[in-house]
Amino acid sequence: GEAGVPFFSISGSDFVEMFVGVGASRVRDLFEQAKQNSPCIIFMDEIDAVGRHRGAGMGGGHDEREQTLNQLLVEMDGFEAKDNIIMIAATNRPDILDPALLRPGRFDRQIAVDRPDRKGRARILEVHTRGKPLAKDIEVDALAGQTPGFTGADLSNLVNEAALLAARTGKKEITQTELEEGIMRVVAGPEKKTRVMGEKERLITAYHEMGHAIVGHYLEHSDPVHKISIISRGQALGYTISMPQEDKFLTTRAELNDTMAMTLGGRAAEEIVFDEITTGASNDLEKVTATAKQMVMRFGMSEKLGPRVFGHDHGQPFLGREFSSEPDYSDEIAREIDDEIRRIVEAAHQVAKDVLAVHRDALTRISELLLKRETIESQEFAALLEGKSEEDVFGPDEVPADTGISERPELPSAADRAAGKLGLPRPGLAGGAAEARGLELPEKPELA
């Protein structure tokens, strides 16, 4: 490798066996071999398999893992400057490691490997696009700007998906079209071409997604709308993608409030247009509730309760999640927390309804175009909101996607809504969480 010294790679699970003493023996053998080949590097992957906090498990206090960890601590204490051995370990659960493993003299330096920033994504894309025929107009830096929050594996998947799409269509180069589709496949999954929605469901989906988009467009602190579509992907019947213009590391209260309002824009559109709600907004409601709860309990953004943090994380290392919750506040405070969460969510919902009420004409006009064309890009959406005609935006010769539906279904009249004749789909149990905001597909339809 780059260091020019022997490299020993081992997984933490390799030390754990059913026979007592095997793990500790393997630790001794590893370090003995390393000393014989010094200078060298030892890399231990998933060290949490043997480095969990002692005494935190459900079993006895002197199990095989603890003996292995004790031997590892002894060996690391035995390092001397002349040994020239560097020990590196990796884990995605640093919170459950034994404190003795992290004290100075053992693992002195902890390096958090987070998601790459824009510059990092550009460097990763350069590696994955090397040797692949990219079109001349593709700029790696611009592509990195379109992929905020992507990991290295996501970027690799994106490039591979784009290359496969180009090969299937007989192209000799990977163009922006394939890369855009690759991004969408990573974010929301592949298109579900076999899923055919009824006319009413397509209409509801179009208004739902346009509700997200219009609210997000007119609120100052929400991310810009990137794409709106009623093409099914994954568990979502449609989706609205919003992307930040730059990498963000802090979020303000105004940004959280506007993001919640945008997330509730789909449900608000259903209420305004159809005077009825569906199960499609279940994932939106889940996200908004979680955000409001964190604003009150974790971020201290409640003016009524003040800058306080409520509750503690009592994580169990063998479960990787909270095993039990012990609130450090009274029942009266708990009721006030619930009231504040409800107030924040209802305020965001009202903001969404107010924005859509002001721009009701645009909601109806662009939703009909979305129903016709199935996908609207960010530049097209902005032009339509400016009042430009369909011909000016899409061109006179562009043929919209063939949806297989001869005419747009009629919206229910006021009399029909009053009589309950809405023609809405039967409610079901919403399931799955999509990365993009979208109308969720019921996982299990209600039985007749």
Image (tube, rainbow, N blue to C red):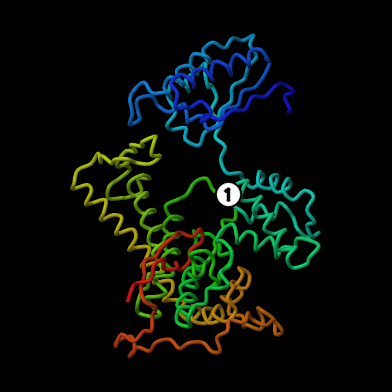
Residue 236 drawn at (x, y percent):
49, 66
Q: Is residue 15 left or right of residue 283?
A: right
Tell me where residue 205 appears, x and y as whole percent.
47, 74
Nearer to the camera, 160 or 127: 160
Asked if residue 247 lies left or right of residue 426, the reply is: right
Which residue is label 1 attached to? 247
Residue displayed at 59% across by 9% down: 80
Residue at the (59%, 56%) spot, across then down: 245
| Residue type at numbered disc 1 | Asp
> Residue 70 location in percent, x, y?
45, 17
For the point 81% across and 62% down, which residue is it? 172
Q: As rendered, which of 10 and 40 lies closer to the eye?
A: 10
113 horizontally vs 40: left or right: left
Picture coordinates of residue 115 (x, y %)?
A: 57, 44
| 108 shown above or below 249 | above
Q: Is residue 257 left or right of residue 415?
A: right
Establish if 345 lies above or below 72: below
Q: Nearer the viewer, residue 318 or 366?
A: 318
- What residue lies at 40% left-to-right and 27% top-to-bottom? 53
Does dot 1 land on a helix, a strand or a loop?
loop
Q: Is residue 317 above or below residue 284?
A: above
**Which residue occupies the extreme front position in the image?**
19
Q: How many marks?
A: 1
Q: Quadrant of residue 341?
A: bottom left
Q: Residues within 10 Å of mark 1 (few under 14, many from 20)?
A: some
Picture quarter with the C terminus: bottom left
Q: Quadrant of residue 39?
A: top right
- Rendered-image quadrant of the N terminus: top right
